[in-house]
Amino acid sequence: MGIFSFFSREKKEVLDKGLAKTKESVFGKIARAIAGKSEIDDEVLDNLEEVLVTSDVGVETTLKIIDRVQKRAARDKFMNTNELNKLLKDEIAQLLMENNTNDGNSFDIPATAGTPYVIMVVGVNGVGKTTTIGKLANQFKKAGKKVYLGAADTFRAAAVEQLVEWGHRADVPVIKQGMGSDPASVAFDTLSSAVANNADVVIIDTAGRLHNKVGLMNELTKIKNVMKKVVPQAPDEVLLVLDGSTGQNAFEQAKQFTKATEVTALAITKLDGTAKGGVVIGISDQFKIPVKYIGLGEGIDHLQVFNREEFVDSLFG
């Protein structure tokens, strides 16, 4: 279990509010799709397929869900359209579980100090990558962990400045170098300082550029190799941050980054400002990478550990 594996009433309220636009959009479309229908027939299924696709669930994942609903309706004799929301809720929750998206489990940081747990964060500019790092650092700090941040996105002065500001807010040290410095050198310095000071967690920010896949792969590989000189198992996690409000563009970014490096976890941000929350379901299904965190607002406490049961309940409850 991760160190943030709990779900309070307050967090549930933030989740409900954050997914409100998606819920209203999905329910409105479903209501129109089944208007005047008394059973789940082919027309209802066709309309439901359109609803899910236009909610950014994605075509392949939508077809899986429709097939599951159709088989479940036939098997369990749920022929009334009033049962449709329950069917969708159950099947989507099951799909998320099959895709290794666990309930409320964050990164599992070892309880004992010594070798730091290293998280390398990747993603394009503007997705909320640096903000996510700051919020993660705040959560780890609150949990009693000693955290170091590495400002290895050295191609944008604003990125370094933003990470430093988040370091102040979370009260954790930020290791940085000058503009245009070698990102791998920053990562090396960060891990060296973290080891010397018995840190528990190190989070490394990387350049938010989606240049050609070869260039991206070489850069990330170099950072990894240099970190291993200090902490042999580093990185323990590669966290890809995606902007949920971009819908299908988030799929494309996930495709590019998973080709360039081994991504072990996802954080999907900006869900509070969009009706495209269905992207969480599709990305989890298509890439088989666990969604660990979702961003539901600008506040420092608005990054939540993803809980599939609560997520689906907020959409269909």
Image: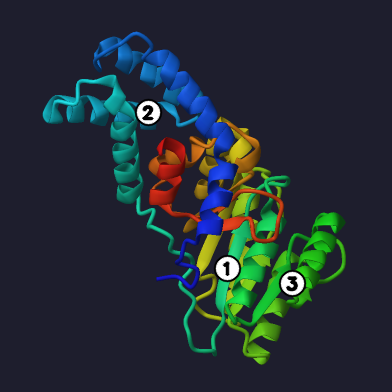
**Does any portion of residue 252 appear in the rendered image?**
no
Mark 2 or 1, which is nearer the eye?
A: 2
The residue positioned farthest toward the front in the image shown? 9
Q: Secondary structure at mark 1?
A: strand
Q: Quadrant of residue 207?
A: bottom right
Near-viewer residue (271 or 197): 271
Give the residue at x 81% y 60%: 162
Spatial CA distance of label 1 from label 3 is 14 Å
Question: Dot 2 corresponds to which residue?
Answer: 62
Give, as a three-letter code, the residue at label 3: Val
**Which residue in the structure is indicated by mark 3?**
186
Instruction: Name the mark on residue 119.
Output: 1
Location of residue 177 by image quarter: bottom right
Amino acid residing under circle 2: Thr
Q: Is residue 243 above or below residue 249?
A: below
Callout 1: 10 Å neighbours few (<14), some, many (20+)?
A: many
Residue 294, compared with residue 170, is above or below; it is above
Question: Residue at position x 54%, y 89% from top?
Answer: 113
C-alpha separation, residue under disc 2 versus residue under disc 1: 32 Å
Q: Secondary structure beneath disc 3?
A: helix
In the rendered structure, which disc, 2 or 1, sits on the residue that comes first in sequence? Answer: 2
Q: Nearer the viewer, mark 1 or mark 3?
A: 1
Label 2 residue SS? helix
Q: Are marks 2 and 1 in contact (CB under 8 Å)?
A: no
Q: Looking at the image, which residue is at 67% across and 54% down?
A: 129
Viewer-closest of 152 and 113: 113
Q: Nearer the viewer, residue 239 or 171?
A: 171
